[in-house]
Amino acid sequence: ELFVPVLGAVEVVAGALLLLGVATRYVALLLAATMVGAILTAGLIDGGAHLVTPPILALLCLLIAGLGGGAWQLGRRDARTR
């Protein structure tokens, strides 16, 4: 019973970090893992039209994890040199 609120809090914090551009690759991997978990637990059991969003979000998170946050991320190592 504690799993759902903890997972919700993790998603909120990770989403905020992703929007801020802090540790984007790691946060995107974490969010992609939660989307895969959503697909495997609720999605395959229930089915339906709501199964469209989690795979798209997981792919977008994997894309961000692969490419990184780009020039606008706050967690850049060379941000102090500019």
Image (cartoon, grey):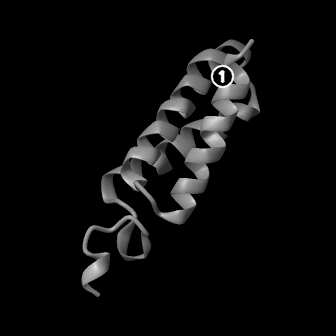
Left or right, residue 45 beside residue 64: right
Left or right, residue 48 beside residue 68: right
Q: Residue at x 75, y 33 (%)?
A: 49
Left or right, residue 27 beside residue 56: left
Q: Residue at x 42, y 41 (%)?
A: 29
Residue 47 horizontal/vertical position (percent): 71, 21
Question: Quadrant of the rendered structure where residue 78 is?
Answer: bottom left
Q: Residue furthest front?
A: 80
Assign the N terminus to one quadrant of the image: top right
Residue 18 horizontal/vertical position (percent): 52, 56
Q: Nearer the viewer, residue 35 or 2?
A: 2
Question: Quadrant of the rendered structure where residue 23 is?
Answer: bottom left
Q: Nearer the viewer, residue 35 or 30?
A: 30
Asked if 18 appears above or below 33 in the picture, the reply is below
Asked if 38 appears above or below 68 in the picture, the reply is above
Left or right, residue 29 beside residue 11: left
Residue 16 horizontal/vertical position (percent): 60, 55
Residue 64 horizontal/vertical position (percent): 41, 55
Q: Residue furthest bottom?
A: 82
Q: Nearer the viewer, residue 13 or 33?
A: 13
> To which residue does mark 1 refer?
43
Q: Give amino acid for label 1.
A: Gly
Assign the C terminus to one quadrant of the image: bottom left
Q: Residue at x 47, y 48 (%)?
A: 61
Q: Nearer the viewer, residue 59 or 75?
A: 75
Badge 1 crowding class, 10 Å Cα cut-off, few under 14, some 14 to 19, many 20 or more, is some
Asked if 37 appears above or below 77 in the picture, the reply is above
Numbered disc 1: secondary structure: helix
Label total for image: 1
